[in-house]
């Protein structure tokens, strides 16, 4: 089915097999994006969990695309400009996979940009703390009264991005409300680490899943009745525990944060070079007799070091270093590929096509 236009926002989530919760969280984020940009952009869905995709297909007969399938469909439908917006919490393994897949598909679109997860830049942490104060603190006080402690339970990971949780905890301790603690199901800090931090805190505790979706982990590992669930562990330590089993996607303040990331991706899209004319370079590139020179202030935006190991060029992104190759001959100096529209010599020489996509 062809798109109503040639621009699309692909909302990529891990996914969940809990149908009601999926509509309240992932669906709510997608609807918010559609309300903001649906007039001029097609909004589509993809999941990164093949297990959930397979389970939904077998159990419910519901077809949801994996990221590659969704991108293939966009190509087939004639979409030329794509914003890929993840609904993940951090730049972990899932986000790395998304970027790797999108990079492979980049030559097949004019422009494609990957938005950032919930917690990426320093200001994201400040925004998340503000959303916690606006949404989660009142929800906790509603079920346990004022002065209660709050525990945010994230998924956790072996990826180095797991440090996101520790950074959030430190910022909550220094700039956020008191007695808010961060723990993880499968990473650091573990439950025992968080209990050490909670020494002296209020004995009334409200648990929230710090996840976009309140799925299996939220219902079983966090709020379940098994002896190793977070709820049971805290009860064994003498805490009075209340659970709010809602994903972050159910709270408007957090949906607005994802909308902000889509807006930032749109801004990045305006400065992205197009592969087919417009403000960006054309599909034909020329080799230019320009020697790379060291730039002390700004590294080459392509991040591609030349053969001699120098990662900087004076061009500020206008040229891509390709070692010492210049019209098929090897020189002792470094040459770059120019992405200007006309022949840099102005003499009508035949263009050389770049041997790689930009």
Image (cartoon, rainbow, N blue to C red):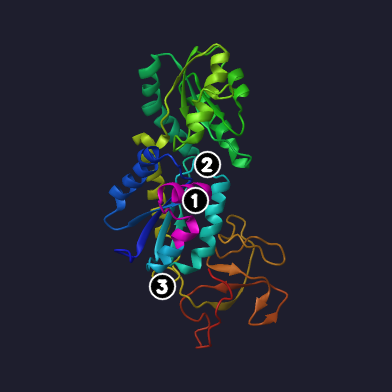
Residue 76, position as x, y percentages in the image: 41, 68
Main secondary structure type of the part rendered in magenta: helix
Mark 3: which secondary structure?
Answer: loop
Residue 298, position as x, y percentages in the image: 57, 56
The residue identified by callout 1 is: 54
Q: Residues within 10 Å of mark 3 (few under 14, many from 20)?
A: few
Mark with earlier residue (1, 3): 1
Highlighted range, magenta: 49-71
Residue 61, position as x, y percentages in the image: 41, 51
Q: Nearer the viewer, mark 3 or mark 2?
A: 2
Q: CA distance from mark 1 to mark 3?
A: 40 Å
Q: CA distance from mark 3 to mark 2?
A: 34 Å
User: Measured along the vertical axis of the image, is residue 313 above or below residue 212?
Assistant: below
Q: CA distance from mark 1 to mark 2?
A: 25 Å
Tell me if residue 282 is in the magenta stretch: no
User: Measured along the vertical axis of the image, is residue 49 above or below residue 355?
Assistant: above
The residue identified by callout 3 is: 277
Question: Mark 3 and mark 1 in contact (Cβ < 8 Å)?
Answer: no
Please tell me which residue is depicted at 61% across the width and 27% down the height of the picture.
190
Tell me if residue 60 is in the magenta stretch: yes
Please tell me which residue is depicted at 62% across the width and 23% down the height of the picture.
193
Q: Nearer the viewer, mark 1 or mark 2?
A: 1
Q: Nearer the viewer, mark 1 or mark 3?
A: 1
User: Measured along the vertical axis of the image, is residue 96 above or below residue 344?
Assistant: above
Q: Is residue 158 left or right of residue 31?
A: right
Q: Is residue 138 left or right of residue 289?
A: left
Q: Residues within 10 Å of mark 2 (few under 14, many from 20)?
A: many
Give the numbered dot on residue 90: 2
Mark 2: which secondary structure?
Answer: loop
Question: Mark 2 and mark 3 in contact (Cβ < 8 Å)?
Answer: no
């Amino acid at each position: 089915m062809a798109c109503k236009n040639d621009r699309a926002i692909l909302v990529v989530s891990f996914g969940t097999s809990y149908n009601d919760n999926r509509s309240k969280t992932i669906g709510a984020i997608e609807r918010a994006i559609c309300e903001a940009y649906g007039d001029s952009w097609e909004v589509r869905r993809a999941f990164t969990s093949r297990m959930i995709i397979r389970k939904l297909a077998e159990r419910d007969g519901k077809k949801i695309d994996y990221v590659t399938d969704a991108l293939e469909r966009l190509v087939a439908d004639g979409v030329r400009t794509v914003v890929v917006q993840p609904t993940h919490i951090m730049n972990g393994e899932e986000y790395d996979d998304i970027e790797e897949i999108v990079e492979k598909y980049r030559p097949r679109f004019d422009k494609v940009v990957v938005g950032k997860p919930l917690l990426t830049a320093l200001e994201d942490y400040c925004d998340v703390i503000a959303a916690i104060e606006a949404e989660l603190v009142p929800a906790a006080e509603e079920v346990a009264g004022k002065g209660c402690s709050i525990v945010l339970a994230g998924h956790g990971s072996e990826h180095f991005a797991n440090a996101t949780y520790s950074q959030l905890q430190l910022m909550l301790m220094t700039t956020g409300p008191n007695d808010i603690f961060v723990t993880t199901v499968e990473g650091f800090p573990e439950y025992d680490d968080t209990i050490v931090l909670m020494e002296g805190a209020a004995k009334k505790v409200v648990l929230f899943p710090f996840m976009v979706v309140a799925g299996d982990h939220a219902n079983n590992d966090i709020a379940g009745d098994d002896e190793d669930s977070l709820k049971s562990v805290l009860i064994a330590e003498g805490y009075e525990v209340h659970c709010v089993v809602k994903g972050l996607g159910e709270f408007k303040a957090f949906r607005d944060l994802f909308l902000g990331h889509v807006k930032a991706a749109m801004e990045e899209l305006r400065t992205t070079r197009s592969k087919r004319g417009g403000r960006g370079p054309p599909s034909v590139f020329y080799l230019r007799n320009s020697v790379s020179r060291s730039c002390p202030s700004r590294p080459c935006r392509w991040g591609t070091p030349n053969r001699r190991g120098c990662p900087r060029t004076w061009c500020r992104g206008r040229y891509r270093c390709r070692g010492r190759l210049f019209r098929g001959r090897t020189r002792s100096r470094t040459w770059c590929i120019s992405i200007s529209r006309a022949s840099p010599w102005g003499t009508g020489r035949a263009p050389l096509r770049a041997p790689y996509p930009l």
